[in-house]
């Protein structure tokens, strides 16, 4: 089953946007859902993204939301067009809700705007790409003839409200961490990143290499850490495959911080 530490890491991750200004969709920001207790009945075999989705469902149910549908696949002519994460209801208001949980790194050399500067650790996705996918595919999917037919057959009305539940953990450059935020919630900054070419700047004693499932957690190493030399031996094979791992790094104060070591 999923761990309490993982759930707390999810729970303590803030919403990425403070409000919907400048966005092509309405954000979900019911802060009351943060008051939610952990239920250990989440299948640990699910991918992290799917477990996060289950955490959100759990939170919503604990705070009075009724589920009309969840994870509804839209299929036409044996082709999957997409999936509606859920339709929920509270106070007689139905909401089509899409759920997003991401890790993004700030790279000022990418794009021209604040939203365009945030990219995935492996440079294979970005915040602006996700925003556009939500705008042009995931949210419009609700209004396609195929979805309308499926919901009609289920006696479900098309919700008038669509919102996006968007959480993210953000990482700023270790060597120049001062970033000015206008659209993004600065409370989402969870750690740092550094290029493999600059790791010699790290004058610390210990590192820990968490599994992908532990990325969401607050750093709390289970076992002894290891030196930079040993870390680099573990990181090298990942970099050859253009994967940027997260590590946990022990500072002089004794506290641990999150740090991506990028291949780029």
Image (cartoon, rainbow, N blue to C red):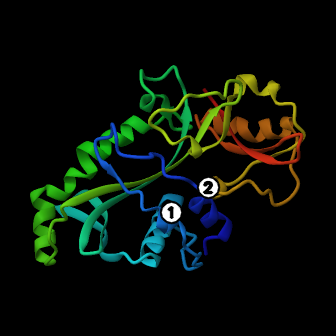
Which of these two is toward me, 213 or 14? 14
> Which residue is drawn at the image coordinates 87% and 36% (left, top)?
204
> Which residue is drawn at the image coordinates 57% and 60% (left, top)?
10
Q: Is residue 183 left or right of residue 172?
A: left
> Which residue is drawn at the image coordinates 85% and 35% (left, top)?
229
- Asked which quadrant contains residue 96, the reply is bottom left
Q: How far apart are marks 2 and 1 (CA)?
A: 10 Å
Residue that label 1 marks: 52
- Asked which quadrant contains residue 239, the reply is top right
Q: Inspect this view and state whether residue 78 appears.
A: no
Q: Do the residues bearing badges 2 and 1 touch, measured as CB atoms within 8 Å?
A: yes
Whichever of labels 2 and 1 marks the residue nearer the N terminus, that label is: 1
Which of these two is toward me, 13 or 151? 13
- Please state, as top left, top right, bottom left or bottom right, where the C terminus lies in the image: top right
Name the spot of residue 104 as percent of width and height, x first: 53, 40
Name the spot of residue 20 as percent of width and height, x first: 35, 45
Around disc 2, counting alpha carbons within 10 Å, would you say few (fewer than 14), some (14 to 19), or many (20 or more)?
many
Q: Is residue 251 left or right of residue 164?
A: right
Q: Is residue 85 left or right of residue 13?
A: left
Around disc 1, counting alpha carbons within 10 Å, would you say few (fewer than 14), some (14 to 19), or many (20 or more)?
many
- Please state, as top left, top right, bottom left or bottom right, where the N terminus lies in the image: bottom right
Q: Where 143 sits versus 230, above or below? A: below
Residue that label 2 marks: 216
Q: Could you say whether the residue bearing mark 1 is in a helix, strand or loop?
A: helix
């Amino acid at each position: 089953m999923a761990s309490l530490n993982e759930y707390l890491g999810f729970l303590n991750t803030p919403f990425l946007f403070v409000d919907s200004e400048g966005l092509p969709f309405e954000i979900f920001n019911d802060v009351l859902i943060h008051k939610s207790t952990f239920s250990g009945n989440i299948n640990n075999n699910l991918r992290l993204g799917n477990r996060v989705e289950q955490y959100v469902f759990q939170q919503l149910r604990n705070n009075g939301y009724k589920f009309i549908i969840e994870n509804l696949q839209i299929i036409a002519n044996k082709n999957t067009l997409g999936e509606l994460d859920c339709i929920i209801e509270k106070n007689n208001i139905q909401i089509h809700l899409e759920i997003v949980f991401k890790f993004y790194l700030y790279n000022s050399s990418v794009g021209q705007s604040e939203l365009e500067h945030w990219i995935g650790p492996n440079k294979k996705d970005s915040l602006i790409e996700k925003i556009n996918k939500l705008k042009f595919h995931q949210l419009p999917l609700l209004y396609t003839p195929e979805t309308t037919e499926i919901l009609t057959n289920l006696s479900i009305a098309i919700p008038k409200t669509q919102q996006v539940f968007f959480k993210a953990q953000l990482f700023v450059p270790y060597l120049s961490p001062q970033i000015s935020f206008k659209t993004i919630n600065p409370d989402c900054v969870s750690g740092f990143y550094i290029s493999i070419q600059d790791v010699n700047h790290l004058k610390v004693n210990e590192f820990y290499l968490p599994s992908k499932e532990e990325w969401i957690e607050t750093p709390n190493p289970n076992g002894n850490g290891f030196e930079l030399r040993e870390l680099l031996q573990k990181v090298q094979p990942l970099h050859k495959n253009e994967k940027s791992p997260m590590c946990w790094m022990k500072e002089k104060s004794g506290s641990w911080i999150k740090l991506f070591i990028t291949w780029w």
